[in-house]
């Protein structure tokens, strides 16, 4: 089983370059350098979005839009998820 280390939204922070300017995220958004260790990823994400972040409205859209390789570079638990998916799909890492 793969579970986000703190919050699922921390994966969006790790993939922020691929999400800039999409789904309400500011085009110049840069998350804190230590975002994986911080709590309140939802709050950080919401502050970067026009109208704030609503998991019900935004989570599926951002999940489809995020770059899994970028998220994996910036977050250990998302790296595990990416690697597990690739193993299931037999895609080289």
Image (spheres, rainbow, N blue to C red):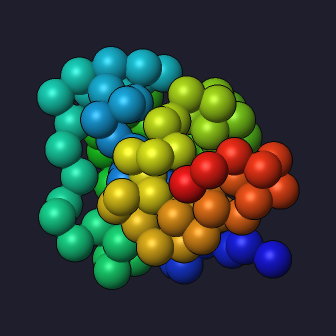
Q: How many marks?
A: 0
Which residue is pictured at 81% across the width and 47% down the height? Answer: 89
> Is residue 41 visible in this depiction of the protein?
no
Which residue is pictured at 23% across the width and 22% down the height? Answer: 27
| 83 relative position to 49: left or right | right
**Picture coordinates of residue 46, whole percent (x, y):** 40, 45
> Against 61, is 44 above or below?
below
Relative depth, front residue between 73 and 37? 73
> Against 50, is 62 above or below?
below
**Picture coordinates of residue 72, whole percent (x, y):** 45, 58
Q: Quadrant of the C terminus?
A: bottom right
Which residue is pictured at 62% across the width and 39% down the height? Answer: 63
Q: Quadrant of residue 29?
A: top left
Which residue is pictured at 52% across the width and 64% down the height? Answer: 79
**Picture coordinates of residue 19, whole percent (x, y):** 40, 30
> Against 24, is 63 above or below?
below
Relative depth, front residue between 34 and 51? 34
> Is residue 80 visible in this depiction of the protein?
yes
**Picture coordinates of residue 20, whole percent (x, y):** 31, 27
| 65 relative position to 91: left or right | left
Q: Quadrant of the N terminus?
A: bottom right
| 5 relative position to 37: left or right | right
| 14 relative position to 64: left or right | left
> Against 28, is 55 above or below?
below
């Amino acid at each position: 089983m793969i579970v986000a280390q703190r919050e699922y939204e921390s994966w969006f922070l790790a993939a922020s370059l691929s999400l800039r300017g999409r789904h309400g995220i500011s085009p110049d958004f840069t998350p804190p350098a230590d975002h994986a260790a911080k709590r309140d990823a939802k709050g950080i994400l919401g502050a970067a979005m026009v109208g704030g972040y609503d998991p019900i409205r935004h989570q599926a859209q951002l999940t489809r839009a995020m770059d899994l390789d970028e998220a994996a570079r910036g977050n250990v638990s998302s790296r595990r998820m990416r690697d597990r998916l690739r193993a299931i799909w037999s895609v080289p890492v």
